[in-house]
Image: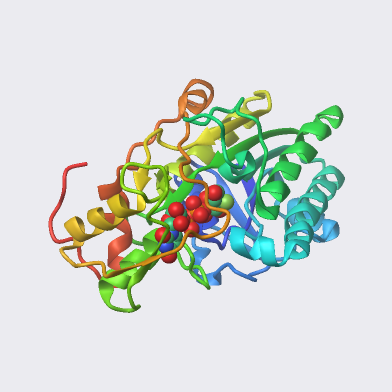
Amino acid sequence: MPDTILVTGGAGFIGSHTCKALRRAGYRPVSFDNLSTGHADAVRFGPLVQGDVRDPRAVEAALRAHDARAVIHFAASAYVGESMADPAKYYDNNVGGMIGLVQGCRAAGVSRIVFSSSCATYGTPDRLPIRETTPQRPINPYGRTKLIGEEILRDLAVEGMRHVALRYFNAAGADPEGELGERHDPETHLLPLALRAASGQDGPLAIFGTDYPTPDGTCIRDYIHVADLARAHVLALGRLMAGGESLAVNLGTGRGQSVREIVAAIERITGRAVPVRLEARRPGDPAELVADPALAAAELGFRTRISDIASIVRHAAPRFGLEPARVEAA
Ligand code: UFG
């Protein structure tokens, strides 16, 4: 019998790709999602339980009904801008959600949690690349709720709870086999918006800020392919299933790409122009965020495989009606 894993937020972008990776690795993923932002048709690799993580009884019931051995916790609100406008929603959904989850886990006797944390917990770092020892000083409510989530899990060690907190950098791309993709509403992320602009579905892409202290003046981020991220969750879970200690690690590539470099890559790979409009900086955007990926390599054996920008664009483009013009080397 495969081990069953409860995947909260399993109908979302990273959650659905992780369910596919879990299934491939021999686990049975059960998605637990209230479908507030997730999509039921993205749940393809195991059953869907419709429920809310803020409800400990619903979490406990799902864990018991499926005899789950561990939890991977994605369910959360994830827009930095919205968190500044409506912080209460973020504390309710993300902190309230973590509290509901751990209460449900405790009641059902489940003591292993893999948690989706974020590079947003670091805020604006003093030094690059960002290591796990870099001070966590979030600059928006979203980042604070993710940091509180990590702290709750650290405190619960006293009752035998073990966890891996995965601090994602910029998740991007789509399932290489084309089964799943990124569908946020509203969409705010650079890659899908730039692909939409290239396809003509939208007007020009707004480039937020061209006066940053970076080589081309635009922000630099560390983009990691969602299928690489999904595989990191399987490794983190494996560590906990084997009795390993709690851990917090960055998930990134160690390489940064500017907004203009992303636009150029999309143009090169799809053969289509990305019309752009230069705009002022977006509030709360740090100039540069790049991970030091060494700890994830040492502790989880995790290395990205397909997080080069060409693969990310090639895999995401068909969902926007764009065919990669030619296969580019990484
Ligand atoms: N950008 C544009 N135009 C757009 C959208 C984005 O120029 O229309 C720029 C942003 O200013 C930023 C870069 O593209 O410099 C990437 O922006 P995204 O919105 O795609 O991603 P963020 O880096 O803002 O956000 C990501 C995650 C969050 C996480 C955050 C940490 O999506 O969950 O990193 O800073 F909190």
Q: Is residue 19 visible?
A: no
Residue 237 as seen in the image, left or right of residue 206:
right
Give the quarter of the image for residue 93: bottom right
Residue 300 as seen in the image, left or right of residue 52:
left
Q: Is residue 77 visible?
A: yes
Residue 77 as seen in the image, left or right of residue 170:
right
Q: Return the residue found at the far top.
A: 298
Image position, residue 213 (x, y; %):
41, 43
The way the protein has been coloured in the rendering is rainbow
Give the quarter of the image for residue 177: bottom left
Exactly how many numbered labels are in the figure? 0
Q: Residue at x 58, y 54 (%)?
A: 284
The quarter of the rendered structure image containing the C terminus is: top left
Nearest the camera: 5 or 235?
A: 235
Nearest the camera: 319 or 51?
A: 319
Q: Residue at x 80, y 56 (%)?
A: 96
Q: Residue at x 65, y 71 (%)?
A: 36
Above-or-below relation of 13 to 169: below
Q: Residue at x 82, y 33 (%)?
A: 155
The quarter of the rendered structure image containing the N terminus is: top right
Image position, residue 103 (x, y; %):
85, 48
Image position, residue 33 (x, y; %):
65, 63
Nearest the camera: 125 or 144?
A: 125
Q: Return the residue found at the far left.
A: 326
Residue 200 as seen in the image, left or right of residue 302:
left
Above-or-below relation of 128 to 211: above
Image position, residue 57 (x, y; %):
85, 58
